[in-house]
Image (cartoon, rainbow, N blue to C red):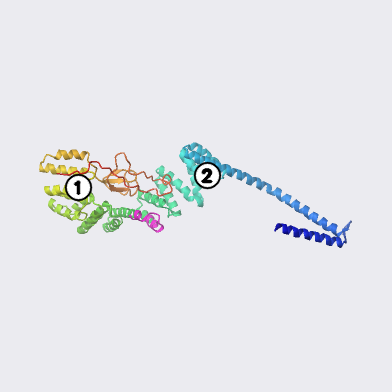
Amino acid sequence: MRILVALLVMATLVAAAVFLADRPGQVEIVWQEWQVETSLGVLVAGLLLAVLLFSGLLGAIAAISRLPGRIRRRRRERARRAGDAALSRALVALAAGNPAQAQLEAQRAERLLDGSTVALLLAAEAAERQGDRDGARRRFAVLGEQPETALLGLRGLLGQALRNHRGDTALRLAERAHRLRPEVPWLSETLLELQARAGEWDAALETLGLARRRGGIPADRLRRHRGVVLYERSRAAERRGDPHRAAALAARAQKDAPDLAAIACHHARLLVTLGRSRAAERTLERGWRATPQPEIVRSYVDIHPEAGPVERAGALERLAGQNPDAVESYLALAEAALAAQLWGEARRHLSMAAAGRASSGPPRRLCLLMARLEDAEGTGRAREWLDRAVSAAPDPCYVCVACGAETGEWQSLCPRCRRFDTLAWRLPPRPGKEAGTALFSPLLSGPGAPLIEPDAAKTPDRLGSGATIG
């Protein structure tokens, strides 16, 4: 196509030249005292030459004017290549465990790349690992001021506040970040935990409501968290002297978290205070169906403190019937039979409890109950059972799935690591083995939720299988 256009232009020029050659003419130009006489062809050629010279002059001026910009662009390109190389070296230094070299390279990249997001983030991480917290905080603050990178900056500042145990600062930062991205799971979990630590249960409930609408927390975890928050609000209403409000909140809490015996016991105690003893019994029976625990037995017996041992044993028959195959049901009935001096019933229930734990051997509590039975009957085998209790498998307790702490009383916050809703009723882990390794700081726990509960720790058999009582 270009060749065709060139041919057409050349043909036009040749035709024009021939036309002018066949029709010569004179041109006279008079300007003041100047007079120019020439042919038409020479004038046209002169005009073309002048146009060409003027165009060349304009091109030269434009090229000279563009020269500084080209020089700046070349410098920026060289700086960009050098900055990319510095970023690569900084990443390699971080991976090699050399934070000092990584910080130097990151600072060089930051200068060369004129404060780009990646350079700032890498420089902040390198400064953090080097121990330069002020430098890291300044860079995170710069990231937090820019709309495109605000979440990155707030996440870094939040991680620093958590590591420095500045709970109020961390809570404010988490609230800002959550307003930006309420659908991010780790943000919802982190904000919820900080609000729980601060005792801001109304705000925690609002956080859960927003997470439910935006999908920030899985449905099963959200429902259990909501049950725990409602339980704490119920306790607050009870402290304010409003038992009716407290009982209503406790009922909702038990519905959302039916596997937490502490909530069922709290609800039952409030119902007893309101004079609704039978409703309290039904509440504990629902709790026993979901998770049989000794705490429910104690609360069930306390509903009628005036009852004698035999009456209590009969009442516990009704409770155990809600979950008849559970080992805790047999142990509860055996303990009640011992209190009522029903030795045959106690032995029968203890034998059935031992059969339920045949794979791991009788637990410590069963051994102690058996020692009481042998001592009461005077068989002389009480010492044998006490010796077995020393090395017996441990009884279930509340274990924090985050730090492995063990406690006999459930709380919404772990008493050791202060994590929210991490206590679970289970067998304690093997000695020397932690139940979990989850970290609270979102900066250290990666892009996912910082409060992920690890899988339940498997407890090995402590005694040989096939243990019997008799």
Quadrant hosting residue 470: top left
- Three-letter residue code for mark 2: Ala
Looking at the rendered structure, the secondary structure element under dot 2 is: helix
Q: Is residue 33 left or right of residue 384?
A: right
Q: CA distance from mark 1 to mark 2?
A: 64 Å
User: Residue 112, position in %: x, y?
Assistant: 57, 43
Looking at the rendered structure, the secondary structure element under dot 1 is: helix
User: Residue 191, position in %: x, y?
Assistant: 39, 51
Residue 306 visible here? no
Q: Which mark is residue 119?
A: 2
Relative to 159, does residue 284 appear above or below in the rendering? below
Q: Residues within 10 Å of mark 1 (few under 14, many from 20)?
A: some
Q: Is residue 77 left or right of residue 28?
A: left
Magenta-colored stretch includes residue 467 = no
* Residue under pointer 1: 355
Q: Is residue 323 left or right of residue 187?
A: left
- Three-letter residue code for mark 1: Ala
Quadrant hosting residue 366: top left
Relative to 386, does residue 304 appear above or below in the rendering? below
Magenta span dominant secondary structure = helix
Relative to 220, does residue 366 appear above or below in the rendering? above
User: Residue 323, position in %: x, y?
Assistant: 22, 54
Magenta-colored stretch includes residue 221 = yes
Residue ranking furthest to the left: 378
Magenta stretch in the rendered image: 207-223
The residue lying toward the viewer, choosing from 403 and 360, is: 360
Q: Closer to the observer: label 1 or label 2?
A: 1
Q: Residues within 10 Å of mark 2 (few under 14, many from 20)?
A: many
